[in-house]
Structure formats: structure tokens, C-alpha cells
Image: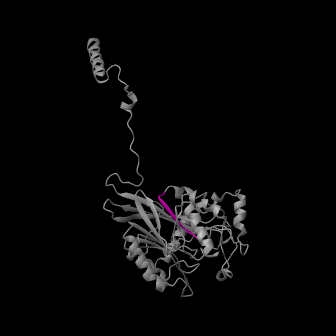
Amino acid sequence: MSRRTFAWFLVMILMLSAAVYPAGAEEELDIEELIEVEEPEETPGIYETDGSTVITVTCTGDFTIGGDNYHNKSKFFYKRLKEHDGDINFVMANTRNIFLNDDLTLVNFEGTLTETKKVPDNKKKNKFLFNIAPEYVTVLSDNGVEAVSLENNHVMDHGEEAYEETKETLRSAGIVYSNSEEIGIFEVSGIQIAMLSYLCIDRYDKPIGQYANLYEKVEADIKAVKKQYPIVIVSFHWGNELDYSPTERQIKMGRLAADSGADLVIGHHSHRINPIEEYNGVYICYSLGNFCFSGNEAPSDMTSFIFQTRFKITKSGDVSNTGFRVIPIRITSIRDKNDCIPTPVEDERLQTDIINVMKDNGRKLNYAVADYPLEWR
């Protein structure tokens, strides 16, 4: 461009600017406003291609912290707490990043948030009772745990009053809970997830949880809830302690829940890992074993796993799972004793051993998953 042409071009620009922004105008042209482009906000869990929402859910087994004011037991947990200067978050040191990087974490909270020493008569002969001061509820809220199942054989260790105190403490901390009478609701990216929990324990073939009555209730509850909420997660505290595979009652109940509309079935109580089924597109995790467990300083089996799955919800509201992965763990970060710090397993041989336990014990299940992936596919 010649100097004469450039001068003419500059004059034209100045004349145009004077016409659009005459002298004395109150607003001045902000060059930065013209060149700055505001980046669109990212919407978590949204597929740009089709607008579907994808939600990542994490589940663990028994979460038991504290001790026993009545029997004066489980002092080892408080010893560990003291070693960490009273910071209850020590138990989540090796797993909190997993929980902080999903959309919903659900654990089975097995115990009470109370300082009372009162124990109902029907519990006084129990070998284990669990409680911890309400202030320690932060171990959940500070570490990415949004929801708990609150239907198990230890939530009533200190009676109805302590149970109500536990629920109020959870509510105040923003933790969603569910039991057999109260539905827990958690919302992710505008999608509401409903959670139900039930206690139905087998013991010496005696239905402690009254299976016969629960079959009808579970079916009716799930069908009613599914009409209102797109995703329904059902937790069961069931089975025989120390068993590595489900009972016939568990299998019947788990599949009934799936047939009734549950999108995911989670189990715990046995303190041992159990296989996973995929039944009519629904994962049934019969037992996630222990997660954080203050009931025993040296359990005979300290292996377990964390379960993660993803739900895809289309614009029309259709829900499907897009697979799952397992994170093998030990309930301790040290070799021989339980320090109450669940820790992902990095040793490939131990990972394989944990997975093989589930594969071997799933051989008699008609719908057992063929593989237990460690990574998302």
C-alpha cells in the first residue's frame, strides 16, 4: 500500500469514527470490549454432539469410624486419630481425589454420630457398637462424599434418639441420606438421582430383615420412585458375614430391584467382596466389602474395591449405563495392621488377585460380568 493510499484510508476511518461516536458522546469506545471474546462456561457431564448428560457415580462398602463408648472398645481408631493431630480427614488421604472428581459418591455409613453412652436393651449384648462425635461428620463433607445409605444393623446402636441426632447431623452438613422410609435425592447437572436403602440380613437361614415382607415393599417403592426420578439407586445391607458370594435371597432381591426400575443396585454387610452381575442392563454389586473400618485392627482380609459407573441421560430422558470400572483397594495403607486409611492398590498382582476373587465367586451367577476393568472403556 502506497503512503498516499494509506493516508486516504486513515482519513476514512477517522471520519467513520466521528460519525458513529460524535464529539461529546458520553460512552467511549472500549477497544478491549471489541476483541475480548467471553469463553462459554463448561457444563459438566454434557456431550456436545447430542446434548446427553453423563453422570459419574462412585460407591463404596462399609464406612465405619469411631469406637464404642458403651464397651470402651475400638481404642485403636482414636489412637490413629491422635497420631494425625485429631484431623479426621486422615482416613480419606488416599481416596479423596477419587471422590472429588466424580458427580456423586455414595457410601454405607455404618454407625452413629453421637456422644451418648445410652444403649437400648436389645443392643447391650452386642459385641460391637459404633459411635463418633457429630463434629466428625466433616470427614464426609470435606472429602467429596455427597450421600450415605443409612439402613444397616448399626445405625440403631444407641437407640432412636441417637439415630435422629445422626440424621440431623448429616442434614446440617449437607449430606443426603436414605433409609427404608426416607428417599435421598441428589441433583447433578439438572438430573435428579433418587436413593433407597434397605436392611435384609441372612443369618443361619433366618430372615433377620424379613425378606418375605420386603419383596413386596421394595418392588412398590422402586416403581413409585422411578415414576418421578430418572435415576434410582438402591442399596441393600444383606447377606452373611464373611461370605464371598450372595445367597439365593440376595440374588432374588437384587434382580427384583432391577426389574422394578432400579438403575443400580449396591450391596454391603458381609465385610467381603462379592461378584457383580449385569442383569437386564443393570449392575448388581452384591457386596463392596469394607471401605473404612474401625471395628477391627487386624481383619483377616483387608482387600476391597471401589465401584464406579457412568449413566447417560438423553434429551428425551432415556437412561443407560455406559460401563463401569473397579478400583481395587486395601482398607489400610500399611502392611500388617488396619490404620483406617483406604488405599488404592498399585501392585498388579494384588489387583489381579482381588479381581479373580470376584470372578471365581461369580461362576454360578447367570449374569456375572465377564471382566472387571480398571479403566474406563
In the image, 367 versus 158, the foreground residue is 158
In the image, 352 versus 152, the foreground residue is 152
Residue 311, position as x, y percentages in the image: 40, 63
Residue 114, position as x, y percentages in the image: 65, 68
Q: Vertically, is 369 above or below 94?
A: below
What residue sits 50% from the left and 79% below the top?
246
What residue sits 53% from the left and 58% below the top?
99
- Does residue 166 appear in the picture of this structure? yes
In the image as oriented, which residue stretches furthest toward the top?
4
Residue 258, position as x, y percentages in the image: 40, 75
Residue 333, position as x, y percentages in the image: 64, 61
In the image as oriented, which residue stretches furthest toward the bottom?
205
Q: Vertically, is 80 above or below 282?
A: above
What's the magenta bit mostly, secondary-structure-wise? strand
Q: How many marks?
A: 0
Q: Is residue 7 magenta?
A: no
Quadrant of res 271: bottom right
- Does residue 248 appear in the picture of this structure? no
Q: Is residue 107 magenta?
A: yes
Query: Which quadrant holds the N terminus?
Result: top left
Quadrant of res 203: bottom right
Residue extent of the magenta highlight: 102-109
What residue sits 59% from the left and 58% below the top?
94
In the image, 348 versus 178, the foreground residue is 178
Q: Is residue 97 left or right of residue 133?
A: left
Q: Is residue 316 left or right of residue 340?
A: left
Query: Which quadrant holds the C terminus?
Result: bottom left
- For the rendered model, the colour scheme is one colour
Q: Is residue 328 left or right of residue 37?
A: right
What residue sits 48% from the left and 57% below the top?
102
